[in-house]
Image: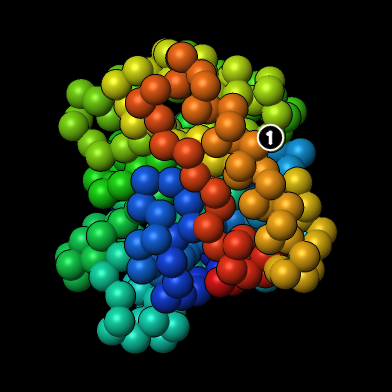
Amino acid sequence: MQANKRIPVLEVFGPTVQGEGMVIGRKTMFVRTAGCDYSCSWCDSAFTWDGSAKADIRMLTANEIIEQLKAAGGDVFDHVTISGGNPALLPQLNALIDLLHEQGISVALETQGSRWQDWFWSIDELTLSPKPPSSGMQTDWAVLDDIVSKLTAGNTSFSLKTVVFDEADLEYATSVHQRYPLVPIYLQAGNGQLQETDPALMLPYLLERYEWLIGQVMGNTELKRVHVLPQLHTWVWGNKKGV
Ligand code: SF4
């Protein structure tokens, strides 16, 4: 029974606003799971997989996670975002998704699209975020093709999101858009200043990066039906965790 299988959790926090992708600005709670099959060079959640927060991982049941969500968020939320790491490594997540739905709570989830889980079909807003060349990772296109085709067949609400740091990343994002032209795609300006602790010092940099990306996309004939976004929470809180 998946319902009793425990889920490795590193953070439960909120309410806050979703800072990225298709539900940007949405009031939500966050559950961050531990473990990732990638090791992106600019990962802003490296503590989920690099061993540095190993002692903080809690193995929780779906019920215990809901208790934690209620303890942190009371009754002021109706939306939960599951993030990682890569939550798609966890087949047992269906128990949490079902319990949240039973309580009238919508569920968003982000994964890089390297693994399929049947519970993808139950997610209310699923973001696939294949990683561009600057991450140092290689996309398994056969796996991603399969995921996109299953989600499309299942009429799931999903989108693509690609972080863009440079021109090679933009070329990659363009190839993702051309491969899946009917799937909404969000291009997000990359944050290359993960060590900066003062949000005020980050803002001019983030603004410059967002303006650069807008400039790249506006004149691009291959990128028409796209959304260009900043990483909103970094504009407010910089690199602070748990917000
Ligand atoms: Fe980090 Fe996401 Fe890359 Fe995993 S896929 S290493 S969590 S950025």
Q: What is the x, y in percent for residue 109? A: 40, 49
Q: Which of 83 and 192 is in front in this view?
A: 192
Q: Which residue does the image show at 30% across and 82% down from the upper left?
A: 76
Circle 1 packing at 10 Å, graded few (<14), some (14-19), many (20+), is: many
Q: Name the residue under label 1.
A: 165
| Residue 37 position in % (x across, y down) | 63, 37
Q: Is residue 131 above or below residue 75?
A: above
28 or 187: nearer the eye?
A: 187
Quadrant (top left, top right, bottom left, bottom right) of the C terminus: bottom right
Residue 34 at x, y percent in the picture: 59, 56
Residue 62 in view (yes/no): no
Seen from this angle, which residue lies furthest right? 195
Q: Does the residue labelled 1 lie within 8 Å of ligand 1?
A: no
Q: How many labels does the image show?
A: 1
Q: Residue at x 68, y 35 (%)?
A: 165
**Which quadrant of the rendered structure holds the N terminus?**
bottom left
| Left or right: 34 in relation to 16 | right
Residue pictured at 60% horizontal, 62% vertical:
235
- Element assignment for label 1: loop
Which of these two is toward me, 102 or 135? 135
Q: Residue at x 31, y 47 (%)?
A: 125
User: Disc 1 marks which amino acid?
Assistant: Phe
Residue 47 lies left or right of residue 98; in this view the side is right
- Residue 85 visible at all: yes
The quadrant where residue 215 appears? top right
Q: Quadrant of residue 27?
A: bottom left
